[in-house]
Amino acid sequence: MYISDPQDHGLSFDPFKAIITPRPIGWISTLNEQGVPNLAPYSFFNALSSSPHMLMFSSEGLKHSAANARATGEFVFSLATTALQQQMNTSSDTLPAGTNEYITAGLEMGKCEQVAPPRVLASPASMECKLVSSEELIDIQGKPADTFVTIGQVVAVHINDDYIKDGRFDTAAAQPLARCGYRDYASVEQVFELMRPTDGETYDGVDR
Ligand SMILES: Cc1cc2nc3c(=O)[nH]c(=O)nc-3n(C[C@H](O)[C@H](O)[C@H](O)COP(=O)(O)O)c2cc1C
């Protein structure tokens, strides 16, 4: 099959999000300008840089998370896991501005140190972020796409000690939840190691 116009794929459903998988889920906490917490999952989410640590999420329409991050300059990423899938899903509900999804999803808020929004206390890891940029995407015709990319720099990290093993974050134990296409998800429960050609016998655990 060849698709010459991605918007006219001829399949029952657009395969875009089913092909670009698995996507990590950024569970994004913000505060609105009145200080009310907001929590929502974003799978157009990823790490962008490791020095300094930067990450991004992308909002199709200026949703509360993106608008709050833009207005306050802060957000927090918590790792969504298989164990927290129901709470993650509940927090994706479209609710009026000023609704605290921590309450609707039955989640406890954890305190952050360097930013004001809370973190998902039950999550194995969270990252406190300060806003680097908030931009609307422009398409190849120069037309605004109504999609907003929020980039943040990580200023602090919280890791539940239960998930630290031999000095490493134990990804398989945390079981990150990943977004696939349609309503499909994957659970990361097994990892394997693959040395790079340049690693030789001297691999020191640092990615370059
Ligand atoms: C697993 C998952 C991933 C999602 N990823 C995105 C995304 O990347 N971008 C987006 O705009 N909406 C995404 N959504 C939908 C938002 O979570 C949903 O619209 C939510 O109500 C937005 O909340 P907010 O307005 O409080 O930010 C996702 C939903 C789920 C369940």
Image (cartoon, rainbow, N blue to C red):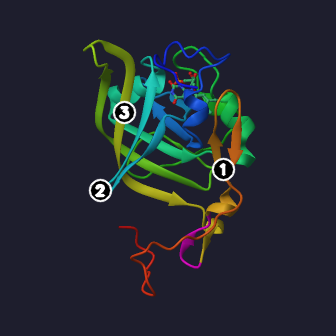
Left or right: residue 23 compared with residue 198: right
Find out if the beta carbon at label 1 lies less than 8 Å from the nearest ligand 1 atom: no
Q: Secondary structure at mark 2?
A: loop
**Tag of residue 52:** 2
Label 3 to label 1: alpha-carbon separation:
24 Å
- Left/right placement of residue 207 relative to residue 15 reads left
Per the rendering, the mark at residue 150 is 3
Q: Residue at x 67, y 39 (%)?
A: 107
Q: Earlier in the sequence, mark 3 or mark 2?
A: 2
Asked if disc 3 and disc 2 are in contact, CB closer than 8 Å, the reply is no
Q: Is residue 93 above or below residue 189?
A: above
Task: Specify which label sits upstream in the sequence, 2 or 1.
Answer: 2
The amino acid marked with disc number 1 is: Ala
Amino acid of disc 3:
Thr
> Left or right of 175: which side holds 32?
left
Residue 33 seen in this snapshot? no
Q: Residue furthest left?
A: 142
Q: Confirm whether the magenta stretch covers residue 167.
A: yes
Q: Which mark is residue 122?
A: 1
Q: Main secondary structure of the magenta part?
A: loop
Tell me where residue 173 sits by quadrant.
bottom right
Please, what is the three-letter code of the amino acid marked with disc 2?
A: Pro
**x, y (%) of residue 94?**
61, 17
Q: Is the CB–ligand 1 distance for label 2 below 8 Å?
A: no
